[in-house]
Amino acid sequence: MGTVEVDEFTPHREHLVRVAYRMLGSLADAEDAVQEAWLRWQRADRSDIVDPRAWLTRVTGRICLDVLRSARVTREAYVGPWLPEPLVERLPAESASASGAGADPADIAVLDDTVRIALLHLLERLTPEQRVAFVLHDVFGIPFDGIASALGTKVDTARQLASRARRLLHSSAPPPLAPLPEQRATVEAFFEACQGGDLARLTSLLAPDVEFHSDGGGKVRAALRPIVGIEKVIRFLLGILEQAGNAVVPEPALVNGQYGVVLRLRPNYSADAEYRAWVAGRETLGVVVPDVSADGRISRISFVVNPEKLRHLPPVDDGSGVS
């Protein structure tokens, strides 16, 4: 590939990965889609392309549509709940102080809601066409004529697809998140209560209808269906902690724009044969993403333990990720 061609494409690559990730929920699949968009860019007649970013966004949308259509069978056969691959990055400076005092305002900025685990999970209810139309229009502002081109349909149909998606998401939308410092305080209190077995404290930190979603993908043990309600969630959490004992080190991180925790195996930890079989040589055991609502209580917990969604996880402090 020529240097000029690379320079023309490179400024748009990060944007295209953001587009594809919101559609596919997988960073690896998103990067594959962007690579395919690059190949189509190479083959295209540039004289017909007025706006390269708009053209590349439409092409990426079309590629993602094909991926989503082929993935539906796989997703329907998925073992247990499917959750998106978590995006883990370094916490902003304000996490060092619950008040945020002295933090750079740019550091306090949290990723927008369109990358939240709960919302990406909700997008799974949409048809591939609805998902592409919604993401392209409502998230990235692509006009409906461009969306119709990506979907191979009429403009009115593209508009209807986005509208139906919007109605479904509005009726089931997760509650807004608390500011990041409040998330931090609640999540830290939650883990302290879990580790101390403080049932009263746990009960006060969880919403009455709290949901727990865990994604093991059939690779490791996980709940095969969502767990709903304080008592059931607490019982399940304490069971996990009893099994893990002191083998797990929780590391705070920014996960899909929220205050989350990466669970890693304690270095040089020796345990009985059953526990060694459970961790199966993994260093990173899972990613926990609690949704802390404006009232300071946790309304949902997403727990990704599928090793295939964790193997490319960067170290927490390296600052990488997709925004």
Image (tube, grey):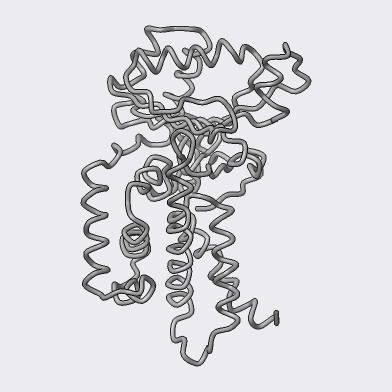
* Residue 46 coordinates in the image, percent (x, y): 53, 88
* Residue 284 as seen in the image, left or right of residue 114: right
Q: Residue furthest right?
A: 268
- Tally of numbered tags: 0
What's the residue at 25%, 41% (across, down)? 172
| On-image quarter of the N terminus | bottom right
Quadrant of residue 291 in the image?
top left
231 vs 59: above or below? above
When the figure is inspected, residue 2 is found, relative to residue 235, above or below; the finding is: below
Residue visible at 26% across and 62% down?
Answer: 161
Compared across the picture, whether 283 is left or right of 301 comes to right
Question: Relative to residue 274, is residue 242 drawn left or right?
Answer: left
Task: Tell me residue 146's x, y (percent).
Answer: 35, 75
Residue at horizontal 36 percent and vertical 64 percent from the top: 136
Given residues 78 and 98, the one toward you in this image is 78
Spot the residue most to the bottom.
47
Residue 179 in which image quadrant: top left
Q: Position of residue 113 (x, y in %)?
A: 37, 47
- For residue 32, above or below residue 121: below
Q: Position of residue 79 (x, y in %)?
A: 49, 35
Q: Which residue does the image show at 39% across and 18% down from the upper left?
A: 233
